[in-house]
Image: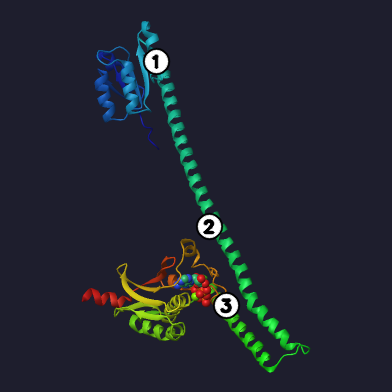
Amino acid sequence: MTEVRKQRILIVDDQSAHTVALCDVLRQYQFDAEGCGSAESALDLLRSEPFDLMLSDLNMPGMDGIGLVKAALQHDPDLACIIMTGEGSIATAVRAMQGGALDYIVKPFKASSLLPVLARAQATRSLRMANAELERQVRQNVMELAEANHRLEQARLAAEHANAEKSRFLSNMSHELRTPLNGILGFAQILAADKLPATQLEKQRFARNIVQSGQHLLKLVNEILDLARIEAGKVPLAMEAVDLPTVLQECRMMVTPLAAKRDISLGFGMVPQKSLRADRTRLVQVLINLLSNAIKYNHEQGRVAVDCSAANGSHIRISVSDTGPGLDPDQMQHIFQPFHRLGRDEEEEGSGLGLALTRRVVEAMQGAIGVESEPGAGSTFWVELPLAPETTQREQHA
Ligand SMILES: Nc1ncnc2c1ncn2[C@@H]1O[C@H](COP(=O)(O)OP(=O)(O)OP(=O)(O)O)[C@@H](O)[C@H]1O
Ligand SMILES: [Mg+2]
């Protein structure tokens, strides 16, 4: 059986005989009653113990009943206060109610008339508390709803953005695929048409064009497939410790002919004897993409510099700087998005997928990529990749 908690009531009256008698009576009616001789001692008690009700005399030496009700309610707004008053001071009792008392009772009174007053005050108190709790819950629900709405709106915007990006990707892709395909069809139709006079030399030129367009188309399709596979997380990465000096030397050998063809000087700074944690083939792909861009988008007799530095404690930053045209802030914003060729379609061959692929590959290897540039002065593309665990350990033990 659950035990019903007794109501705690504080009786405040400067006539101690009256207080004692009232406490006795109320205890008989299952109240947990305590008595006090002044408003000041009542306030002390209220601050140290919780009470449900307070029954206070109106006129007392020192602080009167009205002052006590106001001070008590400041401490505990839920306390149910009732004023006891003499026949002549009912108007003052009304003032006490305006100050926060729930009810008043005229002295002298019998227990039979006090009990309904206490019950009413208690019922009002319970109602007010339930109401306050309800209001708190409503406020909390409104807040939670607002938060959920905000999250939903964010998700909707993200989905809209992703959808717009996909549509842009598809339309760019169709355009990029159509160009070489039209070239192949056009030249093939000329070759197939018996009526068109064409010399053997012209026929060979047409055939070369078909092969070139076919190769470009194949590169595009392969890169698009690679991009889609990486995005779907379907590319298995063979993560291993890759020796940094060896891999940079390998890349240097690979891009030297392209740099020589364009009269670009290649400079490699000090390379630390460290190993990176990476997929070797993918790391080469990343570095070749950055190096070939730095060579392709450079001025004649320009320079390309590769530098390595420690980054982020356990990472290495590889920077590829060029003396090319550089990028403005708007171009930098779009540079890692697929098919953004920044108006270089005519000048240089390319599909506009190199940097988009590079970024995804770097991020799949737990690395980061970025660019710093000043229009007219050149650009620096950098990648940061984690050191292989053995290297970190060796350094710590050294
Ligand atoms: N180092 C650079 N300096 C100036 N512009 C650059 C540089 N690197 C890239 N860009 C610009 O960014 C565009 C996108 O480069 P990205 O490597 O993604 O594609 P791409 O070089 O055009 O083609 P590919 O897919 O063959 O690499 C380039 O077309 C070029 O306009
Ligand atoms: Mg490129």
Q: Which residue is mark 1?
A: 104
Instruction: Quarter of the image for the N terminus: give it.
Output: top left
Please give the name of the residue rendered at 23% of the width and 73% of the height, measured from the top-left corner: 396
- Relative horizontal placement of residue 112, taking residue 357 as reference (left or right): left
Please give the name of the residue rendered at 48% of the width and 47% of the height, measured from the top-left corner: 147
- As measured in the structure, the alpha-carbon distance from the residue carrying label 1 to the one carrying label 2 is 62 Å
Q: Amino acid at mark 1?
A: Tyr
Toward which corner of the image does residue 214 lie, by quadrant? bottom right
Q: Amino acid at mark 2?
A: Ala
Mark closer to the chain start, 1 or 2: 1
Q: Amino acid at mark 3?
A: Leu
Q: Which residue is mark 2?
A: 158
Q: Which residue is mark 3?
A: 220
Can the viewer see residue 234? Answer: no
Instruction: Quarter of the image for the C terminus: give it.
Output: bottom left
- Secondary structure at badge 2 equals helix
Toward which corner of the image does residue 378 lie, by quadrant? bottom left
